[in-house]
Image (cartoon, helix red, strand yellow):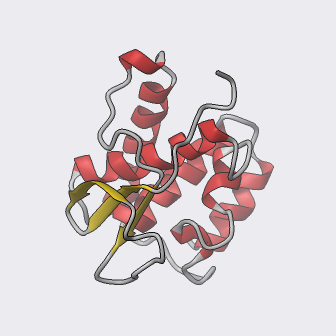
Amino acid sequence: MKLAWILWLSQLLPQPAADSLCLSTTVYLEARDQTLRGQQAVAEVALRRLDSGLWGDSLCKVVTARKQFAPTIVPPDTRLGNGSAWEHSIKVALNAEDNWALPIGQRREIVPGASHFAALGIAQPSWSNAYLVATIGDHSFYKVQALKPRHS
């Protein structure tokens, strides 16, 4: 299955299915080779960004914001060919969404306050000198800016 097809399908699906598909795709592309904790942290950053409203009002808009997450960075003809990793990414995304739906004080946060992450072996973003929240596997998670939920 190709990334372009998944992103096309996400535009046809109703909410919340579309957002779950977009988050699953992001977890797969960004962290399929990472630990469960690393995958959860990637999902958490996307959900925290959604809460802020700065990158869009849906997870699909957040993860397809220009040059923010893998869905807009890797080529559209990228194949998501690892079926077991895809199934696992779906579970991680759905669990992350369930966790994020809890009241703020009840959520299990992996990277509290992290608004960005990078695989520093691949990229050196300009903000990589921001406050380092955690390093999990190949990814470093940063609090680049204080994000407040838009509905607080």
Quarter holding the N terminus is bottom right
Please say if 96 is above or below 83.
above
Q: Residue at x 41, y 65 (%)?
A: 30
Instruction: Provide residue 96's location: percent of width, then percent of height.
Output: 42, 36
- Disc count in the image? 0
Residue situated furthest right in the rendering: 12
The one nearer the camera, 128 or 35, is 128
Residue 15's image quarter?
top right
Where residue 10 sits: x, y (%)?
70, 53
The residue shown at (58%, 73%) is 2
Closest to the observer, 122 or 87: 122
Judge left or right: residue 105 versus residue 5.
Answer: left
Q: In this view, does 151 lie above or below 76?
A: above
* Placement of the C terminus among the 4 image quadrants: top right
Of 112 and 36, the residue lying toward us: 112
Question: Is 137 rendered above or below residue 46?
Answer: below
Where residue 75 sits in the image (x, y, percent)? Answer: 59, 84
Q: Where is residue 33 in the image (x, y as percent from the top left)?
A: 26, 66
133 left or right, relative to 14: left
Residue at image point 68% right, 31% down: 150
Whether 105 is drawn above or below 6: the answer is: above
**Residue 117 lies in quadrant:** bottom left
Which residue is located at x 46 percent, y 20 percent? 104
